[in-house]
Image (spheres, rainbow, N blue to C red):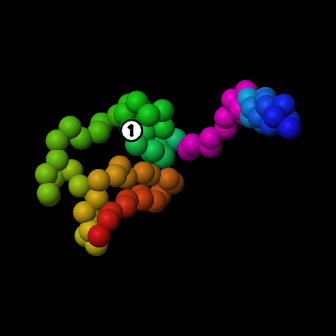
Amino acid sequence: MRWVTKVSTTVVLACWLCCHALNSQAPQTKTVRTGDWPQFRGPSGQGISDAQGLPVSWSTTQNLRWKTELPGAGSSSPIVVGERVFVTCYS
């Protein structure tokens, strides 16, 4: 019975490796519209934007389009999808 366990482990490992290899070869498709900022540091994760004329300084009144109160502190990066901005917080 010991060889059955050894064979079963080998088969499971081989299946896992095949599935992992096939998944890594599958094309990764993401639909990101121009202007979206779908993750931390932007679409490519590099923190780079092609936008022109972005502000280089801001304050509580300068270069703001909107602001809102959150029910708790936050430490995540906001994301932009279409005309929506998503922020999170914890309380």
Category of crowding for the residue at label 1, using alpha-carbon neighbours closer than 10 angstroms: few (below 14), some (14–19), many (at least 20)? some
Quarter of the image with the N terminus in it: top right
Q: Quadrant of residue 46?
A: top left
Q: Is residue 1 above or below residue 38?
A: above
Which of 21 and 34 lies nearest the eye of the viewer?
21
- In the rendered structure, the answer to whether residue 74 lies left or right of residue 1 reads left
Q: Could you say where residue 38 lies in the image, as x and y percent from the top left?
A: 48, 46
Residue situated in front as seen by the camera: 91 or 85: 91
Q: Residue furthest bottom?
A: 71
Check if residue 61 falls in the magenta segment. no
- Taking the spot 84% from the left edge, 31% from the top edge, the residue there is 3
Where residue 76 appears, as percent x and y from the top left, is: 34, 52
Check if residue 24 falls in the magenta segment.
yes
Farthest residue in the front direction?
Answer: 1
In the figure, is residue 38 to the left or right of 51? right
**Residue in view at x 47 percent, y 58 percent:** 83
Report the span colored magenta: 20-33
The percent coordinates of residue 88 (x first, y second) are 37, 61
Q: Nearer the viewer, residue 44 or 74?
A: 74
Would you place residue 85 above or below residue 31 in this image?
A: below
Amino acid carrying label 1: it is: Arg
Quarter the C terminus occupies: bottom left
Q: Position of residue 31 (x, y in %)?
A: 62, 43
Q: Quadrant of residue 61?
A: bottom left
The residue under label 1 is 41
Residue nearer the viewer, 85 or 12: 12
Residue appearing at x 40%, y 43% in the figure: 40
Q: Is residue 46 visible?
A: yes
The answer to which quarter of the image holds residue 37 is top left
Taking 64 as reference, is 39 left or right?
A: right
Q: Secondary structure at mark 1?
A: loop
Asked if one can make out residue 11 in the rendered structure from this viewpoint, the answer is no
